[in-house]
Image (cartoon, grey):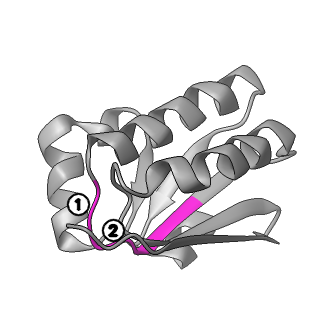
Amino acid sequence: MNDTNISMTHETVSNRLVIRIQGNLDVHNSHKIEPELMTLVKSATSAIVYDLEEVPFISSAGLRVLVTSLRMSQEHGHEISICSLKPAVAKVFDIIGMQQLFKIHSDLKSALQ
């Protein structure tokens, strides 16, 4: 995959910081959002939800960013959950056991409950 477009938005919904990532979360892109993502995680005042509905592909570089942010959020006393995984991304998560680290939800609505 060589799509180098990636973006990230965030908002507070139901007292949770919802971070939406759009684009491939891979070696070509993860470094582009990592600094802002870590800043958001450090400054979070509540639980965090990563909405990955628009992430069609994730590599080990993207997984590293997610796990690093999880460690940081745990240091600040906040949990991170993930929702809306595309089938290819869900398969990667299943293979490496990411559900042991993160709460995984089928959609944003269930993640906010």
Tell me the quadrant of the picture where the C terminus can be found: bottom right
Mark on residue 90? 1
**Numbered label tally:** 2
Residue at figure coordinates x 58%, y 25% from the top left: 71
Residue at figure coordinates x 39%, y 69% from the top left: 4
Q: Earlier in the sequence, mark 1 or mark 2?
A: 2
Kind of residue at badge 1: Ala
Residue highlighted by disc 2: 85
Residue 83: where, in percent of width, then height?
Answer: 45, 65
Q: Are marks 1 and 2 in contact (CB under 8 Å)?
A: yes
Q: Quadrant of residue 2?
A: bottom left
- Is 42 a magenta residue? no
Q: From this viewpoint, is residue 47 visible?
A: no
Q: From this viewpoint, is residue 90 visible?
A: yes
- The span shown in magenta is 50-58
Residue at figure coordinates x 40%, y 54% from the top left: 104
Disc 1 element: helix
Residue 94: where, in percent of width, then height?
Answer: 17, 47
Q: Is residue 32 left or right of residue 105?
A: right
Mark on residue 31? none
Disc 2 element: loop
